[in-house]
Amino acid sequence: MMRLVHDASLPGARNMAIDEALMESARQGDITIRFYGWDPGCLSFGRNQAAAGHYDADAATARGIDIVRRPTGGRAVYHCRELTYSVTAPADAWGSLGYAYCRINRALAKGLQALGAPVACAGERTGGATPGPTARACFRDPLPGEVTAEGRKLIGSAQWRDGGALLQHGSILLANEQRVTEELRMTSRGPGSASRSDAHTGAIGLGDLMKAIPSMADLVGALRAGFETEFDIPVEAGSLGKPELEAVARLIDRYEDPTWTWRR
């Protein structure tokens, strides 16, 4: 069985603390799919991405934008009008990182296809190299295995394995607002910056593909069915348990700490 947790929109640090806390349950054999939003809007950095000196914290604060560093790798993402998913499971549940990555993305694609969204997974990923943790934005470059539409990235994902558990999470864009990552990037300013390729040009949102964006209930319901179809096991609604909430309380301090956020 997979557990489904559908959370409200939360600050970035709490979202990341919850995702990491769920890995502790995964080490005990639990599989959890979590869906959530962000409030306020948040810029997130990959675990080892260079951010200090590249992104403008003061400009983000002036715009009411939160900043957090994820436990997973990858590159900068702006989280606002999106539904974010996370999957936590034992690290050996579905084989290699690349194979598990593709299966999770196939489940997401099946759910969106059932709603009529013309999406597909890019060429299967088999464990090859992915782009390093540069200052570039995640949505500038669709990668093999990711969910795309019209040649552009709809869902940006990253996976981390630690202590026998895996965490994969990613952004399902409802609207493409990834230009904000470039607007906050200090190295994108100055003479000639207008000619740079904006982060949003590689991304696409559900609103660009459908006459109307589905309700959250319909979207989560379809994605739930996609996981049941792909993995052939039931997905049952649940909530965080007391040990998980205690882990969140312990972990959140790190994600709120500027020395973690700006460590690179």
Image: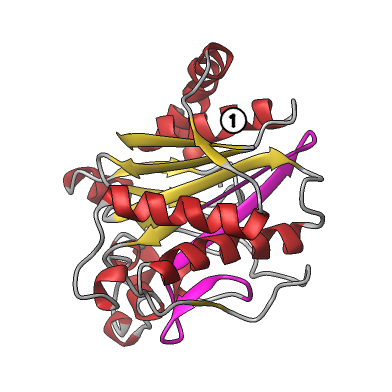
Which residue matches tag 1?
A: 22
Please tell me in which quadrant of the rendered image residue 179 appears: bottom left
Please provide the residue range marked out in magenta: 144-170
Residue 104 spot, x, y in % from top left? 61, 58
Name the residue nearer the viewer: 117 or 152: 117
Badge 1 marks a residue whose secondary structure is helix
Position in image of residue 238 (x %, y %): 48, 28
Looking at the image, which is closer to me, 75 or 126? 126
Residue 65 drawn at (x, y percent): 25, 46
Label 1 Cα crowd, 10 Å radius (few <14 / some 14-19 / many 20+): many
Looking at the image, is 159 positioned above or below residue 11? Answer: below
Q: How many marks?
A: 1
73 and 231: which one is in front? 231
- Front residue of 37/181: it is 37
Quarter of the view holding residue 87 = top right
> Please, what is the dominant secondary structure of the magenta stretch?
strand
Residue drawn at (31%, 53%), measured in percent from left and top? Answer: 218
The image quadrant where one finds the N terminus is top right
Q: Is residue 10 visible?
A: no
Image side of residue 52 versus residue 134, left or right: left
With 91 as the anchor, is 138 left or right in this view? Answer: left
Kindly identify the residue that appears in the image at 81 percent across and 57 percent down.
96
Instruction: Name the residue at 48% across, 50% down.
Output: 224
Residue that appears at 26% across and 60% down: 214
Q: Amino acid at mark 1?
A: Leu
Whether 252 is among the magenta residues is no
Above or below, comparing residue 33 to residue 25 in the picture:
below
* Residue 261 location (% of width, % of height): 48, 39
Residue 107 in sight in this render: yes
